[in-house]
Image (cartoon, rainbow, N blue to C red):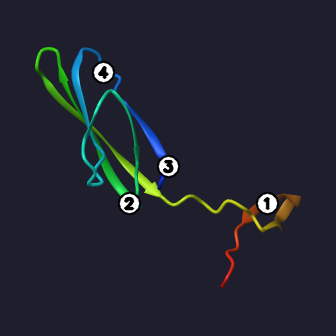
Amino acid sequence: MVLINKPIKFTDTSIGTVSTSWNFGDGTPSVNGKNVSHTYKKIGTFRATDTITSSTGDIKTCFQDIVVSNPPPTSPVAVLGFSIAAGLTLLGTYFISKVK
C-alpha cells in the first residue's frame, strides 16, 4: 500500500538497458530513468508501467498495480481491552475522530 502525497521510489534492475520509461497510471507525464520517484495525488489503484529498451533494440514492458490510500489516523485517543475465555486479553487501539 502506498500513501497519498508521499513520494515512493521506483527502480528498474534490468541489465543492458539503453532507456527506461515509467508511466505511473495516474495521468501524469511519463518519466525517464532507471531510478525515479513519484508522488500519487489521488486515492485509487493505478498501474505503474516500466518500458525498457535493450541494447539490441528489444522493448519490454513490466507493470505493477499500485494501491494508494489515505494514511491511518496518527494519534490514538483511547486504548480499550477485551477479556475473553481462559484469561486471555486482547488489546486494541481505537481512533475516535472529533465531531465539529
Q: Assess whether mark 3 and mark 1 are in contact (beta carbons under 8 angstroms).
A: no
Q: CA distance from mark 3 to mark 4?
A: 26 Å
Residue under label 1: 91
Task: Looking at this view, name the residue that lies furthest to the left.
Answer: 57
Give how far across and how far down residue 99 sits, in percent: 67, 83
Q: Residues within 10 Å of mark 4 (few under 14, many from 20)?
A: few
Question: Between 21 and 77, which is closer to the camera in this rendering?
Answer: 21
Q: CA distance from mark 1 to mark 3?
A: 30 Å
Disc 2 element: strand
Q: CA distance from mark 1 to mark 2?
A: 31 Å
Residue under label 2: 44
Of callouts 3 and 2, which one flags the residue occurring earlier in the amino acid sequence?
A: 3
**Marking on residue 14:** 4
Q: Amino acid at mark 2?
A: Gly
Disc 1 element: strand
Q: Amino acid at mark 3?
A: Lys
Residue found at x 24% / y 14%: 16
Q: Residues within 10 Å of mark 1 (few under 14, many from 20)?
A: few
Residue under label 3: 6
Q: Is residue 24 above or below residue 76?
A: above
Residue found at x 51% / y 61%: 70
